[in-house]
Image (cartoon, rainbow, N blue to C red):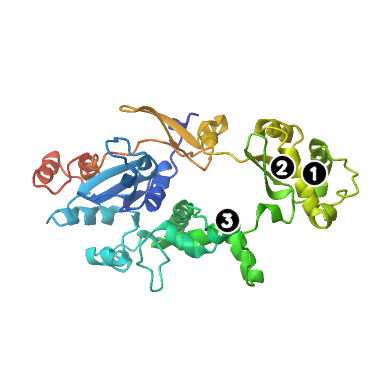
Amino acid sequence: MSVMQMHAALDDLLVVDFSRGLWSGVAGAFLGDFGARVIHIAEAGERFEWEESLVEGSEWDYLADLAQRNKQSLRVRFDDAQGKPLADRLIARADILLTDWPLARNQAMGWDPETLCRSHPSLIYARCTPFGPLGLERDAPAIDTLAAARSGVMPTLPQPGQPPVIPEMGGMFTSLMLGLGIMTAVHHRAESGEGQVVDASLFGANMYGASLELQAYLAIQGDGFLGPVSREDVGNPMSAALYMTRDERWVTLTMPDTDRWWAAFSEIMGIDADDPLFDDHEKRTDLHRREFRQRIEAVFKTRNADEWRALFHAKSLSADLVEEFDYPANDPSALESRYIMEREDPRHGVVASVGFPLYMTETPAQLRKPAPAPGADSGQVLREVLGLREDEVEALRAQGTLGEPGSS
């Protein structure tokens, strides 16, 4: 059975998407990937986070490919007498409302959860917030870097004496969290008929991304816990360790149980497996750890990276090269598994984009529709979802209620 013939798991869901940020937009795109009808509603003239990546003169908004794929775009003027009522009517038909607007703005529009869930009790109200739904900072700026700065992980990432490193992954964690929460709420509604509020925050997602380290801190605590560790000072030279090759690339080793790997590893390192300095785990990781590390470091500089990778694979060792983005972008397995997708664009030829991180045999994700131009689907949405006639749509367009298709 081909992908295009397969049933879409979420094709009975209607999502009204007010997202402005990339991370919340991606959460809506996830639902569209699995068949939901996602209508992105925006005020005519408003710009979005995914549009900020455009360089002057560029026509390809590559981040919109990620945040807006599998969506329809409707642009209306909310200050128009008929603009907001159109959005209200779409919300009334929606299964899910997705928003990352500040709480005060939603309240001003009458789109806060208390109002909507009272009039629409089966609605799943999904929102992305910066620091969570409660507390004094629930309406702070939704910026991933600020949330990451408070998560505790940034000072642990660099080498000692270097500035903290911004991981820049919390937004995508938030997208996944919100998608999971929405589908849990959909399951609950199928059983009970009840909607509910689903909230995922940048702060919570950044914390969860660092949950192994944070959980260890909660258990142990103490000053300086999990501070940055020099690569020369790692506790086990064969685990979470980095070494430079002759051609100045990095390899990483992940063999915490050194006894398990010792026979094969010592062979490629040219070390006698019975060398009395390194012949058991305690000697390699404690008594002679520094000497062991220096020995390994010197050996890695004798071969190029590709030679080391071939040796790792030949010996089935838990080790590999540290790659840059060109590796996953061109990896045949990434294309085969649709982690990277290629498609034909009428203006730009073959373009590549991040694909689907989740594999399913019967209801796979599909790229049914690339990111639309702003407002490109206004007429179709109003005709198909609200039942407006063509002349009514044209009248709305003529009086300026709808944004011009393709305009920001």
Q: Amino acid at mark 2?
A: Ser
Q: Amino acid at mark 1?
A: Trp
Task: Measure the C-alpha gap from mark 3 to mark 1.
Answer: 27 Å
Q: Is residue 126 above or below residue 387?
A: below
Dot 3 or dot 2: first in sequence order is 3
Q: Amino acid at mark 3?
A: Leu
Q: Can the viewer see residue 70 in this picture?
A: no
Dot 3 or dot 1: first in sequence order is 3
Q: Residue at x 66, y 70 (%)?
A: 220
- Secondary structure category for the residue under label 3: loop
Q: Residue at x 69, y 53 (%)?
A: 232
| Crowd around label 1: few <14 · some 14–19 · many ≥20 (10 Å) | some
Q: Nearer the viewer, residue 341 or 328?
A: 328
Foreground: disc 3 or disc 1:
3
Dot 2 or dot 1: first in sequence order is 1
Q: Residue at x 79, y 53 (%)?
A: 289
Quadrant of res 127: bottom left
- Secondary structure category for the residue under label 1: helix
Residue 291 left/right relative to 35: right
Disc 3 and disc 2 in contact, CB within 8 angstroms: no
The dot on residue 261 is: 1
- Secondary structure category for the residue under label 2: loop
Q: Is residue 329 above or below residue 178?
A: above
On the image, the x and y values in percent for residue 26 come to 40, 48
Quadrant of res 88: bottom left
Q: Nearer the viewer, residue 338 or 257?
A: 257
Q: Which residue is mark 3?
A: 157
| Crowd around label 2: few <14 · some 14–19 · many ≥20 (10 Å) | some
Residue 252 left/right relative to 171: right
Q: Can the viewer see residue 299 in this picture?
A: yes
